[in-house]
Amino acid sequence: MPLDHYVSQVHLRKFYSPALGKRMYAIRKTDLKAFTPDSQAVCRIMDGTTNAYLSNDRAVEDFLKTVEPNYSAAVVQLVTGEIDGQCVHAIAGFIAYVMACSPAGMRIQAGPLRSIVEADVALMEARGALPPPRPVLRGLGLTELLHSGAVKTTIDPEFPQAIGIQSLLRIMALFGNFKWEILRNCADDSPFFTSDFPVAIEPTDAPWILNRIVPLAPTLALRIRPDPTVDRNALDLTFSGFGYRRRDLGRDEVTRLNRLIVRCAEETVFYRDDHAWVRPFVAKNRHYRIEPDTHRVATPSGTLLVLTQRIAANAPANER
């Protein structure tokens, strides 16, 4: 069985520490356990991208052949400004793969599916399409049981992964046609982190629009700003809408972005330099993760589901 890395090793190697050789520092968010893995030892699952819902259960491999071999060169191109279509393809493809195939991505994308199932149940029950509740349920319908938590909707994590794998080119095309900010970290003693889900979200003034913060190296990150005017159904792999600008960041903004990176990590944070401030910083921000967020809006014909994401606390306030 193949051992699949859901965060590409070519990405993780950018965060190797000179003090460790071919290793990096890592902290687990749950218990603050520190360790020093290499890229091969982490962010991997046996048969992690083998998906039985697809006619070709290893379909993702063909996609990765167009991304991973070009990733390191693409990072260099972002630094030098010699950005071409292959560069955009490699970086946007890396982001699409993480969002589709990582455990965090699969968990997050299961949320909208769960909301859709529960909305359909409520609609079917309102129309009398479901049998009446049995006496043992004390007259409670399925919608009430779902709302009370007595019944839970379970989504096979491979199902949202299959949808994500089938949508990899579309997701890559979207990110490749948005506007990018290439962020250079000028704070020598405050390098960027990365994580087992290195595609952090950043709220904007528009409630339903989230920027993506993607660390690429200790001194380099991207901010990708979604453009609501880009056609979601188009597959523009020429990236005709792509544009970028450069920004140099001081310590305060680097700290803010690192806070997002840690909070959006699923379980593990990786970093190059073992500064004294790192562990307290991770400890302060570890009780958060990305959660799917569904808003239900009643309409004359039913319910409109507005699907987004948020950074949510997952521990009591006195432990955050």
Image: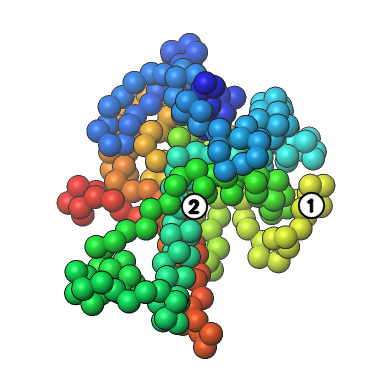
Q: Which residue lies furthest to the bottom in this view?
A: 300
The label shown at residue 110 is none
- Mark 2 or mark 1, earlier in chain: 2
Badge 2 marks a residue whose secondary structure is: helix
Amino acid type, residue under disc 2 in the picture: Gln
Displayed quadrant of residue 25? top left
- Nearer the observer: mark 2 or 1; the answer is 2
**Residue at (46, 53) in percent of width and height:** 110
The residue beneath circle 1 is: 236
Residue shown at the point (38%, 53%) measured from the top left: 154
Disc 2 target residue? 109
Task: Give percent across and percent down for residue 35.
Answer: 34, 21
- How far, Cα to Cα, is label 2 from label 1? 24 Å
Residue 10 in the image, given as x and y percentages of width and height: 59, 24
> Residue at the spot x=62%, y=32% of the render?
58
Name the foreground residue: 311 vs 128: 128
134 vs 239, left or right, is left
